Image (tube, helix red, strand yellow):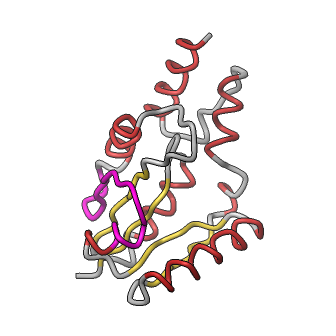
């Protein structure tokens, strides 16, 4: 069985993330969306909330599982039995950062490959940060995230205002 992980903080999950998940599932028997408990970022949603939002967004994708993790991505990949880490690329600056991570991961775990998938052009400008920024200013984010995610984001910002 070919297993890959798709790691990220997914704060929030976007339609661009979901595009990568769906496409990765075409190449692997199982894709584990690995939701990172990232201590370097202040997230809008807790780890548990991000997992629930992703589970709802991927419920119709039978080869996709969602799990939280902390620590090294390659160690989590090993725990899952994964042979690949899937990463999405939007632009050149993404490639430079992702290439560095891939090289480090290869040194740490030579048996795990990094697979890059180019984001579809319709999602190339979408980032979780820009969605949160737009939502905080009451912008319409409906075309960038699933409906349940939009609702959750708007609820978060209503509580903080």
* 138 relative to 126, above or below: above
Q: In this view, does 9 lie to the left or right of 27?
A: right
- In front: 78, or 57? 78
Q: Please state, as top left, top right, bottom left or bottom right, where the N terminus lies in the image.
A: bottom left
Q: Residue at x 73, y 52 (%)?
A: 125
Where is residue 72 drawn, in percent x and y? 42, 65
Question: Which quarter of the picture shows residue 64?
Answer: bottom left
* 117 relative to 62, above or below: below
* 77 relative to 42, above or below: below
81 within the magenta span: no
Q: Is residue 110 left or right of residue 139?
A: left
Q: Which residue is drawn at 40% across and 52% down?
A: 35
Where is residue 29 drawn, in percent x and y? 28, 75
Where is residue 114 drawn, in percent x and y? 50, 80
Q: Please state, as top left, top right, bottom left or bottom right, where the C terminus lies in the image.
A: top right
- In front: 145, or 37? 37
Where is residue 124 drawn, in percent x and y? 70, 58
Q: Which residue is drawn at 45% across and 84% down?
A: 113
Farthest bottom residue?
A: 110
Farthest right residue?
A: 92
62 within the magenta span: yes
Number of marks in the image? 0
Which span is picked out in magenta?
Answer: 60-77
Q: In this view, does 119 lie to the left or right of 54?
A: right
């Amino acid at each position: 069985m070919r297993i890959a992980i798709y790691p990220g903080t997914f704060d929030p999950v976007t339609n661009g993330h979901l595009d990568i998940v769906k496409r990765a599932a075409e190449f692997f028997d199982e894709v584990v969306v690995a939701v990172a408990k990232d201590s370097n970022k202040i997230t809008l949603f807790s780890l548990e909330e991000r997992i629930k939002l992703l589970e709802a967004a991927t419920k119709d994708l039978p080869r996709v599982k969602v799990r939280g993790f902390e620590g090294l991505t390659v160690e989590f990949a090993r725990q899952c039995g994964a042979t690949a880490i899937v990463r999405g690329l939007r632009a050149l600056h993404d490639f430079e950062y992702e290439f560095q991570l891939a090289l480090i991961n290869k040194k740490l775990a030579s048996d795990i490959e990094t697979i890059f998938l180019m984001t579809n052009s319709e999602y190339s400008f979408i980032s979780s940060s820009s969605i949160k920024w737009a939502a905080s200013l009451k912008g319409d984010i409906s075309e960038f995230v699933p409906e349940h995610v939009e609702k959750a984001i708007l609820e978060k910002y209503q509580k903080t205002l």
